[in-house]
Amino acid sequence: DIQMTQSPSSLSASVGDRVTITCRASQNINTYLNWYQQKPGKAPKFLIFRTSTLQSGVPARFSGSGSGTDFTLTISRLQQEDFATYYCQQSYSTPLTFGGGTKVEIK
Amino acid sequence: QVQLQESGPGLVKPSETLSLICTVSDFSISSGYYWGWVRQPPGKGLEWVGSIHHTGSTYYNPSLKSRIIIGVDTSKNQFSLNLSSVTAADTAVYYCAKTYYDILAGSAMDVWGQGTTVTVSS
């Protein structure tokens, strides 16, 4: 199985801050990396496809980059509605696996 | 806009079988895509359980493979999850989800149900 490791596991930030979340795969997954946002009590929301393709309706302040084993999700200017937990997920091979999540909290 | 809705018992006894159904609305399962299950134990992260294609092809998480069956009923536009010999470790919110493309590897899960909480307890 491909292990996905996210860092940090949590962070505190203020509205307007730039936030970067890292996801590392245990082997080369090319660009087969997706990102999801989850708010408490809600289902995950699909944010970014194959490393960098923003889904319809996702604000442009979100961006993704990387390839191989190292990936990042960046929020350029954090907004109130961005406080949530973010998960990466590899789709290179089954079993599909998720990172442990990064909780973005209000400072 | 396709919608998914999970249903099933909220409480299952240890050693019994957990059975859930996901009903798909505003889209025919027979049209394609993979339909699957993801679970989330209380306070923890997401775990892919398994997926099924409308043709019946299945992919399961090896950690659950001996206990899991995912089925599809195209006449009812539903797919199902059966997880046998459950223990407290199977307590989780179970989500059903659809893939973004008509493939599993290389895709993503773009539409999710709201989730249903299943507790394993006597």
Image (tube, coloured by chain):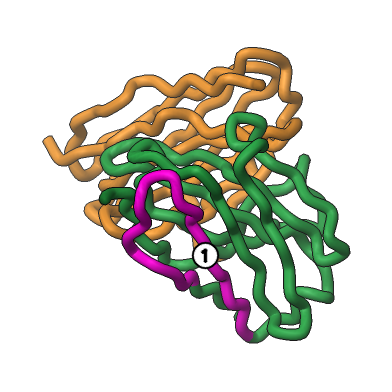
Q: Identify the residue at horizontal 78%, vertical 62% (top origin).
A: B33
Badge 1 crowding class, 10 Å Cα cut-off, few under 14, some 14 to 19, many 20 or more, is many
Q: Is residue A60 above or below residue A26?
A: below
Q: Which chain is green?
A: B
Q: Using the image as rendered, state which of residue B14 and residue A48 is in the foreground.
A: B14
Kindly identify the amino acid type of the residue bearing the numbered disc 1: Leu
Residue A66 within the magenta-colored segment of the rendering? no
Q: Using the image as rendered, state which of residue A40 and residue B71 is in the foreground.
A: B71
Q: Quadrant of the C terminus of chain A?
A: top left
Q: Which chain is orange?
A: A
Residue B24 within the magenta-colored segment of the rendering? yes
Residue A76 in sight from this viewpoint: no
> Where is residue A3 shown, x and y percent of the image?
57, 20
Residue B49 in sight from this viewpoint: yes
Q: Identify the residue at horizontal 24%, vertical 28% (top origin).
A: A11
Q: Main secondary structure of the magenta part?
A: strand
Looking at the image, the residue that sits furthest to the left is A107
> Where is residue A32 shown, x and y percent of the image?
71, 34
Q: Which residue is mark 1?
A: B20
> Where is residue B60 shown, x and y percent of the image?
69, 41
> Where is residue B74 shown, x and y percent of the image?
77, 78
Q: Identify the residue at horizontal 57%, vertical 36% (top origin).
A: A89
- Which element is circle 1 on? strand
Residue range in magenta is B6-25
Q: Identify the residue at horizontal 73%, vertical 47% (top origin).
A: B107
